[in-house]
Image (cartoon, rainbow, N blue to C red):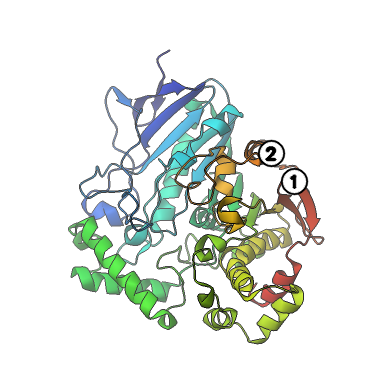
Amino acid sequence: MDLVVATRSGAVRGVSADDVNVFKGIPYAAPLDGARRFQAPAAPEPWEGVREATAFSASVPQTTLVPGAPPVWTPGADTDCLSLNVWSPDLGARLPVMVWIHGGVYIGGTSDSPAFDGTRLAKDGVVVVTVNYRVGYEGFGWVADAPANRGILDQLAALRWVQDNIAGFGGDPDNVTIFGESSGASSVVTLVAGSAKQGLFRRGIAQSVGSVFCGAEENRKLGELILGRVGAQPTAEALGAVPSEAIHAAQLAVMAEQNQNRADWTNSTPFAAVPDGELLDDLPWVQLRAGGGRGIELISGYNTDEARMFTADMPAAAKDPALLARGLRLAPSVLDEYRAGYPGITDADLFSLMLSDQLFRMPSLWCAEGHARAGARSYLYEFAWPSPARDGAFGACHSLDVPFTFGVDRSDVTAPVFPDETPEDFEVLSAELRASWISFATTGDPGWPEYGDDRRTRIWNVPPSVVADPVEVSREIWQHRF
């Protein structure tokens, strides 16, 4: 069978693998050449004949997230990298569509990670799309004559491509769900809360929404420091002449300065979505509470031990709750509230808990609560399955939910937090979670009660359960920031 599908830009040829039709590296926007690197995404350039869609495109320009890890992007790589990939079990069907937005702290990540292979989800009965989008300074940095949030604009362009073309791949353009993790989850709630996405999707799943959203003033301050290092004017034309690798070197240097002068900065990470008055007017949970995205159904959630991904290897002496409280601008009395609410907790565990609450747990909860208060359909979950790796040091840490979401037990995501052998619970819990996500993408019902006054929350463990207000202590401590 010749797997050729017509798109508005031209025909593409995919392959059939493991009973799923796969199309890789389809451009949804024009190449990132010159000034285009810093402008809103342009329409893809049409082509004659049939384009091979059997290999992933290059990743977008970026620095390596993990020191010593193989580079995701190398200088000189193809600039035709604003692409997406499609997994479809049946090209003639009209199936729900799930569009994945990867994480990576807004400075890295790529759609071609083995962790995001859509085969298992597609075999369960949906069309899966994964997307490249601009990150770092090119995606989220201040440029005087260019729009903010260019990485989010890329995501919107990909969603418009889905509306225009996904029917040819067996997908239903009227039944699209966006889902993502970490900064991908923050992108999801940005798109849900914003006003620019009307008609592009019906539902969102936000897995570990981050607390970091960058104010315009701090975003400009960071951009000016990077511009000073590369010696360029703050225009798309001038910056388009600066090699990406030079910008990334400047970005790394400025990030190092940030870490040395943390008190001078509000944000814990350099880049994030910026409330710009167009895509986003305020923090997403604030905008959701005010009714932004009321017509969109939303699942949001967090992992029990989010911060253990980052604290597991810290020396015990560095896990100082009092120092962390000062850094988070919390009143000294907060430590007493935590200790009263979590009797017997050690300093090391309290440090990780406070950081988990600040980084991901509370923002995810606030999104569910804000959406529910606005009268929208809202659901909350807690992923509580603890990894047995390293004698349980990671617990249910950040990103541990991703392999369960895709049913992929061996990848760059699982390598640090899974033991050498796949845990016995993996297939059971992954099947449960995938079935829930697909049910939500199909009908809007994930299989547990909506979030409301009783704060009923799905607990993802073996077996799954529903608990009322499982993080009541932390929620009340942080309520003043909601």
Quadrant into which the C terminus falls? bottom right
62 or 368, which is in the foreground? 62
The x and y percentages for residue 57 are: 32, 38
Q: Quadrant of the N terminus?
A: top left
Q: What crowding class fits label 1: few (fewer than 14 Cα within 10 Å), some (14-19), or many (20 or more)?
A: some
Q: Residue at x 44, y 59 (%)?
A: 105
Mark 2 or 1, nearer chain start: 2
Q: How many numbered marks appear?
A: 2
Classify residue 171 by image quadrant: top right
| Lateral position of residue 93 relative to residue 258, left or right | right
Query: Residue sitting at 62 percent across and 76 percent down?
Result: 347
Q: Secondary structure at mark 1?
A: loop
Residue type (three-letter) at the residue carrying disc 1: Pro
Q: Position of residue 399 (x, y in %)?
A: 54, 52
In percent of width and height, residue 212 lies at 50, 67
Residue 290 x, y percent position in the rendering: 65, 65
The answer to the question of whether label 2 and label 1 lie on touching residues, with beta carbons closer than 8 A, is yes
Quick check: can you spot residue 144? no
Picture disc at residue 464: 1
In this view, the residue in front, 466 or 452, is 466
Is 322 placed left or right of 139 in the picture? right
Q: Residue at x 53, y 60 (%)?
A: 309
Query: Where is mark 2, residue-wise?
Result: 432
Element class at badge 2? helix
Q: Can residue 356 be seen in the rendering of this structure?
A: yes
Q: From the viewer's perspective, is residue 115 above or below residue 292?
A: above
Three-letter amino acid code of the residue under disc 2: Glu
Find residue 51 and name its label.
none
C-alpha span from label 2 to label 1? 8 Å
Q: Residue furthest top?
A: 1
- Residue placed most toward the observer, 451 or 262: 262
